[in-house]
Amino acid sequence: MFEKFKRNIYVSIILLLVTSLTILLIPLTDVFSGNTQKVCSYIVGAVFWLSLILGQIIFWIANRERISIEHNLQKKEIKRLSANYPGVLCFFQNREAAVADVTVIISFLLVIAELIFKIKSEWIILSSVSTLIFSFGMHCILNGINYKYIRYVGKLQKENGSNE
């Protein structure tokens, strides 16, 4: 059950990446003209929204799986992990989260600077927004309880030499 939980977290991260990368496809729809441009625009939009919604649903499913695993194990150490704030409110909880946190701060400042200085390059703006979306999602995941749980169970498995 833990492996299914972990797989769902990774799938939601992949879908988050797809969501942010579709933003970079927006200028490519202008290459075409007429109906082809409309179809490409609809496809890019559909992929964006489907990957965003599906990624969130899979993440919520993974969260429910973690809660179910915790109730089945009934260990105080694991229960204690649940008492933290949501990942969106936490910063620098681990090394991976620190990378995401620094990236989200830099990309946010970059987007603000682009607005202030009225940058005209579509690619620069879309790249920064894409990076901001992905890094913000990773900030939330890597600082959150589900990732802490993956790390904690991984540590326990390493200490016990088992694959629970």
Image: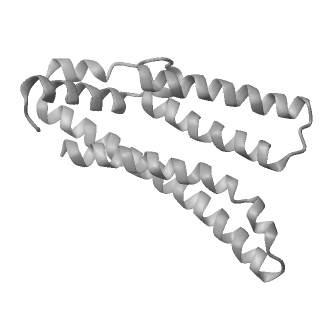
Q: Nearer the viewer, residue 132 or 73?
A: 132
Using residue 44 as the reference point, say whether residue 135 is left or right of it.
left
Which residue extends farthest bottom?
35
Eyeballing the image, is 33 above or below 78?
below
Question: Number of callouts in the render?
Answer: 0
Residue 17 position (above or below residue 135): below
Q: Nearer the viewer, residue 69 or 125?
A: 125
Horizontally, residue 162 falls left or right of residue 69, namely left
Q: Position of residue 4 (x, y in %)?
A: 24, 49
Q: Position of residue 21 (x, y in %)?
A: 61, 52
Q: Is residue 52 shown to the viewer in this render? A: no
Q: Toward which corner of the image does residue 128 lie, by quadrant?
A: top right
Q: Nearer the viewer, residue 147 or 122?
A: 122
Q: Does residue 36 sit above or below 112 in this rendering? A: below
Q: Give residue 141's quadrant in the image.
A: top left
Location of residue 108 with respect to 51 vertically, above or below = above
Tell me the residue at 34%/33% (across/down): 146
Q: Report the quarter where the C terminus lies.
A: top left
Residue drawn at x 27%, y 38% as measured from the top left: 66
At 70% from the left and 29% from the top, the residue drawn is 108
The answer to whether residue 68 of the structure is visible from this angle is yes
Residue in the foreground of this view, choosing between 5 and 102? 102
